[in-house]
Image (cartoon, grey):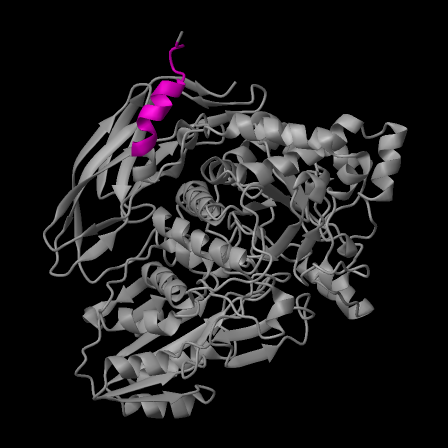
Amino acid sequence: MTRPGRTTRAQCAATTALLLLAGAPAPAQQVQPDAAAAEQRAETLAARMTREEQLRYVFGYFPPLSKDRPADMIPSAGYVPGVPRLAIPTLRESDASLGVANQIEQRKGDTATALPASLALAASFDPDLAYRGGAMIGSEARSKTFNVLLAGGVNLTRDPWGGRTFEYFGEDPLLSGIMAGESIRGVQSNHIVSTVKHFALNPQETLRTTIDARIDEAALRESDLLAFEIAIERGRPGSVMCAYNKVDGDWACENDRLLNQVLKTDWGYRGWVMSDWGAVHSTVKAANAGLDQQSGRELDKAMYFGRRLAEAVAAGTVSAARLRDMNRRILWGVVSTGLIDHPVPTTRQPIDYADHAGVAQEVAEKGSVLLKNDGNLLPLARSARRIVLIGAHADVGVLSGGGSSQVRSVGGAPVEIPLTEGAASSFARVTWHASSPLAAIRAMAPGASVTYVDGRDPAAAAASARKADLAIVFAWQWRTEAQDVETLSLPDGQDDLIAAVAAANRRTAVVLETGGPVLMPWLARVPAVLQAWYPGQRGGEAIANILFGVVNPSGRLPMTFPASEAQAPRPIIPGLAAMKAADAAAKSGSTYGMVDRDLSPHVPYAEGAAVGYRGYLKAGTRPLFPFGYGLSYTGFRYRDLRVEGGPQLRVSFTVTNTGRVAGADSPQVYATAGRRDGATTRLVGFQRVMLAPGETRQVSVTVDPRLIADYDVAGHRWHVAAGRYPITVGRFAGDASLSGTATLAERVVGP
């Protein structure tokens, strides 16, 4: 019998295709057909393991620091010995957000394909591209004999300062969840395991191993946890990686509410929870709270899941059933991904790097965002005779982000600058990929004089710009794991450089290579700005293609760019001042960006679920550039809005390319919803559409009810209140190119 207001499995199956097409998350009730078989097989294998084997499979080594190194241990991120007699595979783990980032082998000259920053992928608004990027990374990992990738970063950007912002997918739970989920699904299409990380509420790097993130549970469910929930539904990752920080007083890796109640009970997650490297603090509490595997044990203060776990099981403080469950969950990830039936090769296999470079370039081209184009300065005419490129090592390469995601790309690194201070100085480096914008632009304009000036002297750069028909300033800001950027201003006097060049030549374009938003005090004096993020190993070619119109820019911002630092929810990075004082006093170091300090600040996320654009619109604050914003070399018109209410919200409309060149648009559907803390504007659907000149296409969105619901903590369910909901279709958050109203019936989603 079907209860009014609830979704049946049959209804779910019928709407799945529309949901996927419209960019909405797959329904929570969708179950893969092999789920029950994988569960039974994992249970059987776990029961057949001896106690010793069960105890050995729940912790992993950090090979670079491992003293007892087996012959088959690759010096990578992690190693968990398998059980050969049961064909249970050894787990060989590598970092992998932007490519196979095996830091140790990179030092020996190993290379891999480097995708652009995840922000660029998010800016494409293209789930299919996210899947293909993940599939490419997964195939390289498999060819390099890895079978677990520490990928799938889905933490929402709450502050513009975040050091790892470039590794994530922005500030919106729907966009982040879809793009991360599709990337995970792509990785696992190679019969290897992907994680989703870092669970949960880990938006800052400053004091990341000690801060206590405080937030109302309902707000957390409607924001960061919703992004994880969507990513897990779409990607079905074999593992979830818990974070370093505390959440409401408990470490994320021993947080019963997060791991047992939310993840495993409410969401029914079958896979295993692995710790981040150095994130474990106990044995009994962690095991009973839901941690299934201690990772990189050498980076923890103690070996919590070795002898101590054996003693706890013997004493009954951790049950034998719980130990078996820990193994069953690991084995579910191994079985459900197909890893157990399709083991990775024992020796390296050939990799089609040329084909994979094409995927990286496509991400850079689709994810670059044209922020300004006054007077149609872009695309550049190939008839330009004198072009000068200025700054950011644009003669030899493009910038990449730092930390565990750093990929030594095919072609090498023409510029590497050691980091001499900060929490990341022991393992991060400022690196440029060998993809020269200068060479690519020269190839586009073979008859022109294309020169390069390093930009260190603004006066000299201005003099060169004055003699040119066109000046292109390449500006950069580097970000890395383990530390946040302390200012949103461009470093090394680049604001003054851009102002000087713009004063010397009115035909000045700025290309930004950054891992997040930056301030632009020169914006009014520069006619064209292209946000290229960290554009990966083919970034130079991608940038040239966009500047000259070979590719029509189509990226849309996955995060808000503030007009000033004062617009951030926390204008000062929590804990930064205290950390600097402690550093100055102790001069303490770290092997992996984790300094042991007696600093554990509470960080109250008072904005709750009003993350990013939701908060800006709620407060009536105007940013520099809003979420979803991006220009094109053509124009688009939206018409024929149709809003259907009742028990299910559906929105449809048409999009027409009104210009003279083909182009892609990503129209966005927003709903104003929420009763608990006041209404907020929320992205409820999007679809990327490619249109020829004059072409019209209909876009249809079926809205997941969780996106317009309030979370009922007591009932562990989502509640959509009956009433009228404003609906807009726009080009960015706050735009209302089309507007309407949906009248919805009350609906409950959950148990």
Q: In front here: 588 or 580?
A: 588
Q: From this view, report whether residue 191 is shown above or below residue 451.
A: above
The quadrant of the image that shows the N terminus is top left
Q: Is residue 195 visible?
A: yes
On screen, residue 596 versus residue 154, left or right, reads right
- Region of the chain picked out in magenta, as a range: 2-18
Residue beneath the point at 47% across and 76% down: 411
Is 49 situated left or right of 437 in this image? right
Instruction: Indicate the position of residue 189 as horizontal and vertical percent values.
Output: 46, 46
Q: Quarter of the image holding residue 662?
A: bottom left
User: Considering depth in this image, is 239 or 386 the residue closer to the camera?
Assistant: 239
Residue at 68 percent of width and 73 percent of height: 421
Left or right: 594, with 234 as reference point: right
- Taking depth in this image into account, of 454 and 574 the one nearest to the observer is 454
Residue 406 in picture, x, y percent from top left: 56, 65
Q: Is residue 344 magenta?
A: no
Above or below 697: residue 36:
above
Question: Seen in the image, is 354 located left or right of residue 168?
Answer: left
Q: Nearer the viewer, residue 261 or 239?
A: 239
Q: Magenta stretch containing residue 13, yes or no?
A: yes
Q: Is residue 200 visible?
A: no
The location of residue 300, given as percent across then percent down, is: 78, 52
Q: What number of labels is visible?
A: 0
Locate residue 29, reporting x and y percent.
45, 25
The structure residue drawn at horizontal position 37% and vertical position 64%, both measured from the top left corner, is: 355
Q: Residue furthest front?
A: 85
- Residue at the extreme top of the image, as rendered: 1
Give the image quarter of residue 392: bottom left
Image quadrant assignment for residue 265: top right
